[in-house]
Amino acid sequence: MAEEEVVLAEIEAGYRLRPATQVGLMIVMVLLGLFIIEQAKLPLDVSIMVATIYVALLYPLIIKIRHRLAIALSFGLYGAALAAILYWIITGHILPLVQGGQAVRLEALALYVIFLEIVGMELFHHLCEEYVFYERDWRSYLMVSLLSVVFFACLYIFLSAYALGFMALLLSAVLTIMFAWAILPEKPV
Amino acid sequence: MDMELIPLLASIAVGFALTFTLGWKLKGRSEALDRVVDAIVENYLDERRFSVNDLRQRTGLDDAELRKALARLERAGLITRVEKGSYRLKDPLVFLTDRDYDRAMRLTKDDNILYGAYQNPYLPRLYLFLVYGLFLADLVFVVGAYLGYVINGPFSSFVAPVMRLLPPGREDLYVPFLLFLLGMGLIFVDFIDNIIKAWARERFMVIVGALSGISYDKAFADELSGRIRRGQIVKVDLNVSLLQKFINYFRSVPLGDVTVVYRVGKEERVESFRNMPFPRELFYVIRSIQLGALQWRKRYARTLMLWRARTAIPSAEGGGRAWPRRRSS
């Protein structure tokens, strides 16, 4: 048994399912999910994307093993889910416009960027907890600041389409503050 | 296999491979970090304060390696920088924010805080979970509106309200706007969750000090006015209900109730700390201070510290030193 497993077994084992049970439950839940997705008769590409996102959302809830491989798998699922979402946006909504000779409007791009930022951060907190530093430092503040600047700019571009004037600026600022506070890593209580 | 699926599968595989490699590398072994942890555990568990110069002498590491290792431990919440070149070791069972930890130290006159955490606000108030219901409603609405737009049918009634929300003549924004609504739903729930956590930190703090006993908040913005001195403790009970046990399988921080019976004069009183993180460890800590025997903590100090440092301590793959196993008592 690896050192870290010995260490963690002492503290967390009493609260968790046994590792074999965790893996077994994960397999059962994945199979159940795949069965439901199959029953929905979705196109195959959509089924693959939905299944990838489903597994990514499920994995950290069930698997509590702190083994190096288990953690790397969690990181891997983050990349897989994000790639699936990005693929769906590009091939499903941006490429058809480009191929049809239409321009992708700036407001639409801004909304896609906002969505990807939010989903990227939320999935990161969900799947890569090992890398979320609850003790905030300059790196987490820098990351949140950069993302907030992009969020603010994109939101302002979108709200400008309503011709709201100064109100667009104000709304963007308020929602950006909400965004920044939401994505700052908070210790679980 | 349908050739059109290849780019999708390739994208998912590349995304997986890239982040898997990143995760694997992040959990890689670090010799410098091992040495720093060893030096801290062997020399500073009691005094809790150490200077970088002392540590440099004990580990033989150069400045850059040492500072990198200390930064990782600081991010993992194991140590806190107190002044230039000096650090304080946090007890591994302290789950408080830095601000609350400082407050606890001040209020207990720099006592050795053995355990510190907040009672979880959600479980006794299941209505708070309605916040997540808001997101669920948002999700159902967005999926319905998307299906109504793409395939029409029974969901078509969802389309008109979304159209009304869009800027005039901008139907092209329909799908991105739905994604925006979904994203903002997530942010809103996270935002409310943070407010609930902030309230819980002000209302439900519980600390156990080696000399000061148990101190806890009795009201919002309280300054740990609830006190149970070590000598007053008569009995401690640990209760993990069926619901808590089930939730603990899936939640990152396990919860349980700890009840303390204590005596004030001739009167026996009962104080229950509901939904405390790592309740078994809290039970052990309270028993230890009740009996005036902190051997349990000393025996497991290293294990506890390594457990808490799980974000910083790499897996032991590739061999290396064996940890001391549990000593038989």
Image: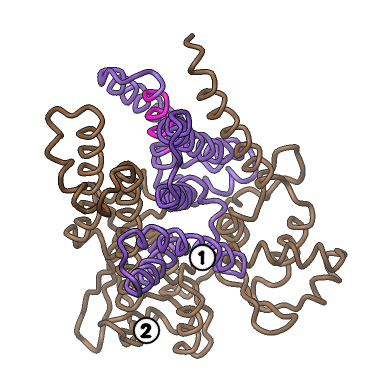
Q: Is residue A39 above or below residue B189?
A: above
Q: Can residue B243 be seen in this view?
A: yes
Q: Residue at x 51, y 34 (%)?
A: A80
Numbered circles on residues, count:
2
Question: Residue A129: horizontal and vertical position, in percent?
Answer: 50, 51
Q: Which of the 4 image quadrants contains residue B120?
A: bottom left
The residue closer to the viewer here, A141 or B220, is A141
Say what secondary structure mark 2 lies in. loop
Label for residue B229?
2
Say what secondary structure mark 1 lies in. helix
- Amino acid residing under circle 1: Val
| Residue B263 located left or right of residue A10 | left
Q: Is residue A49 above or below residue A154?
A: above
The residue closer to the viewer here, A76 or B38, is A76
Mark 2 or mark 1: which is in front?
1
Q: Which residue is drawn at 49% across and 9% down?
A: B1
Magenta segment: does it hold A121? no
Query: In the rendered image, which residue does mark 1 sit on?
Result: A149
Q: Which residue is drawn at 75% across and 80% down?
A: B85
Q: What stretch is highlighted in magenta?
A: A46-56
Q: How crowded is mark 1: few (under 14 residues within 10 Å), some or many (20 or more)?
A: some
